[in-house]
Image: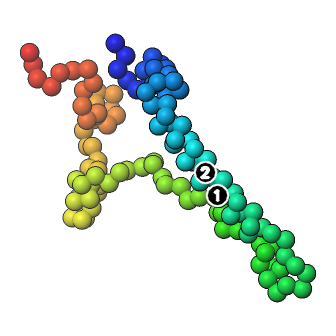
Amino acid sequence: MAKSTRSKVKRSFRAKKRDEGVYAATEAARLQRLNSKLMAKIDDGDKELAEPVEGDDNAQDAMELDDSEKLSTTKPSRISTHGSRNSRREEWRKSKGMTPVPKSTRMNRQGLPAARRRSGRPSRRR
C-alpha cells in the first residue's frame, strides 16, 4: 500500500540492499572514493599550516586563516522563501502599472472581504 519513498518499509529494504544486497559493492566504492577525497583534502591542509620559520617575510601570511575557515565563520546569505513568487501573471500586471494581485472589493455577509472560492463546494452542479 505505501508507495511513498518516505515509507519505512521501502526505506528499510533499500538500506538492506545497500548493506548486504545487490548495491553493496557500489556503495562501498562510493564511500571509498569519498574517503580518499577527504583524506587528500586533509593532507593538503596540513601542508599549508606548516609552522613558519622565524625571520621569514611570509610569517604573517602563514598565521592567517585559510579561505575555507574564513568562509565558515561568516554567515551564508540566505535565500528568502517568504512572500510572493512573482508568477507570470503578476509580472505582466506590474509591467502595465497595475497592482500585482488585484484587491477584492466584494464583501461577505459578515462584512469581511469575500473569499476567492468556496471551500468544499463543487464548481459545477451535479
Q: Position of residue 72 (x, y in %)?
A: 67, 58
Between 10 and 113, the residue placed more toward the observer is 10
Between 24 and 125, the residue placed more toward the observer is 24
In the picture, which quadrant includes the C terminus?
A: top left
In which image quadrant can residue 13 be found?
top left
Between 112 and 79, the residue placed more toward the observer is 79
Q: Position of residue 57 (x, y in %)?
A: 82, 87
What element does badge 2 sit on? helix
The residue that appears at 84% across and 71% down in the rendered structure is: 51
Q: State yes or no: discs 1 and 2 in contact (Cβ < 8 Å).
A: yes
Q: Position of residue 63 (x, y in %)?
A: 81, 73
What label sits on residue 40 in the rendered view?
A: 1
Which residue bears the numbered disc 2?
A: 36
The residue that appears at 59% across and 54% down in the rendered structure is: 37
Neighbourhood count class around disc 1 (C-alpha, 10 Å): few under 14, some 14–19, many 20 upward = few
What element does badge 1 sit on? helix
- Rendered position, 28 above or below 91: above
Give the residue type at disc 2.
Ser
Between 60 and 14, the residue placed more toward the observer is 14
- Rendered position, 47 above or below 15: below
In the picture, which quadrant includes the N terminus?
A: top left
* Distance Cα–Cα, label 1 vs label 2: 6 Å
Give the residue type at disc 1.
Ala
**Residue farthest right in this picture:** 54
Left or right of 58 on screen, residue 30 = left
Q: Is residue 8 visible?
A: yes
The residue that appears at 59% across and 58% down in the rendered structure is: 76
Neighbourhood count class around disc 2 (C-alpha, 10 Å): few under 14, some 14–19, many 20 upward = few
